[in-house]
Amino acid sequence: MSVQHDPVQRADFDQFMVPNYAPAAFVPVRGQGSRVWDQSGRELIDFTGGIAVNALGHCHPALVAALTEQANTLWHISNVFTNEPALRLAHKLVDATFAERVFFCNSGAEANEAAFKLARRVAFDRFGEDKYEIIAATNSFHGRTLFTVSVGGQPKYSDGFGPKIQGISHVPYNDLAALKAAVSAKTCAVVLEPIQGEGGVLPADQAYLEGARQLCDEHNALLIFDEVQTGMGRSGSLFAYQHYGVIPDVLSSAKSLGGGFPIGAMLTTSALAKHLAVGTHGTTYGGNPLACAVAEAVLDVVNTPQVLEGVKTKHQRFKDKLEQLGRQYDLFSEVRGLGLLLGCVLNAGWKGKAKAILDAAAVEGVMVLQASPDVVRFAPSLVVEDADIDEGLARFERALAKLTQA
């Protein structure tokens, strides 16, 4: 039985919502696979993936089935009790990664918040109150809570909210010498994205991550990898650290972990996890049965050779065409990224115009993202069909043709 809803329109956003977003002029109402339909019935191809969230596209049958079954069984029980979906998901994440322990929460910011609190608590317990400094990268992004936005290396997001959390410093990404100069006996953690997402889809150099691992070992600091955007198959490996072969002490995951259902996770070792003893940290919704049931279904589908290999071949299909378009229309200086997280870096003539390209693409029926004003970002479903890739990029080309002719 379908419920009758009152009609709403895009203008209602401007009337009722806090104005911290500037959503598109059209309102998507339905999705299937890599396609969505707006209120007028217009069909668009979705290369945004809900900002690297919809790992299996829209309304994937395995996720719909998992959610429906759990919705008819048990929704919420709180962490006064544990639940079967959370235990199954934790077991599978441990089996698939370096981790021995998992903490569930509801978002990437919360996963990073837990990681940063863990790092400071470990250092406090082991070395005393002076070892609390966190080193992060310039242009990094780690969330919007006061702690995570302070660790993130983009002042535009952290300025204007009163005194910032102390003991955080930022060094240029992929600059090992700068990191080496910054690390000291006071450092409790180095926090890095294996691929900077919001900072422009910038992959780490192999030697940089290896060097960071060594520096952390030398200074008794934890290496934290923020894999909120890069994790769950996005890079072509289940997690990007596996692509690089550099093992962190703590890893944060969210976005694709739930395939569209809100969930986050912090993964770590038993030796570190014991520092978050009973009462030291918590969350009301974290690890709830609905989220964990869906995430388990996502993991079961994504963590297969078929899907992970498919990500790599689809990467090449995207990259080859995007590089050709960049040359043809004299737009991109580089197409970079891993797996199905790709960034088209705009050349000098188009610098700052990513939003204009995004808007033009939407007019032609394809949804893309930006990662800074200078980079057009693609983060589609990991199982996007080749026919949808080709059609979506054909629409993208039409947008570029009109833009460059204007």
Image (cartoon, grey):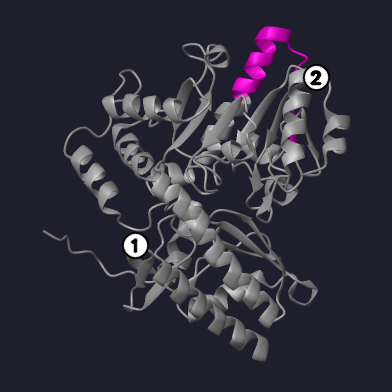
Extreme left residue here? Answer: 1
Residue 76 on the magenta span: no
Q: Which quadrant of the figure contains the C terminus?
A: bottom right
Where on the picture, by quarter, is residue 201? bottom right
Where on the picture, by quarter, is residue 141? top right
Which residue is rendered at x = 28% and y = 24% of the image? 83
Residue 119 on the magenta span: yes
Which residue is rendered at x = 55% and y = 39% of the image? 109
- Name the amino acid type tagged 2: Lys
Q: Is residue 133 visible?
A: no
Q: Specify whether 47 is left or right of 118.
A: left
Helix, strand or loop under label 2: loop
Relative image position of residue 364 (x, y in whole percent): 48, 81
Relative image position of residue 31 (x, y in whole percent): 33, 64
Which residue is rendered at x = 55% and y = 53% of the image? 339
Q: Which quadrant of the figure contains the N terminus?
A: bottom left
Extreme bottom residue here? Answer: 405
The residue where tag 2 is placed is 186
Crowd rating for badge 1 (residues with CA inside 10 Å; few <14, some 14–19, many 20+): some
Height in image: 380 above or below 37?
Answer: above
Which residue is rendered at x = 64% and y = 39% of the image? 244
Helix, strand or loop under label 1: loop
Relative image position of residue 64 (x, y in whole percent): 25, 49
- Name the amino acid type tagged 1: Gly
User: In this view of the protein, which residue sits in the foreground, 309 or 70?
Assistant: 309
Find residue 33 and name its label: 1
Label total for image: 2
Start-end of magenta stretch: 117-136
User: In this view of the protein, which residue sits in the foreground, 134 or 180?
Assistant: 180
Who comes first in sequence, dot 1 or dot 2?
1
Height in image: 397 above or below 62?
Answer: below
Q: Is residue 135 visible?
A: yes
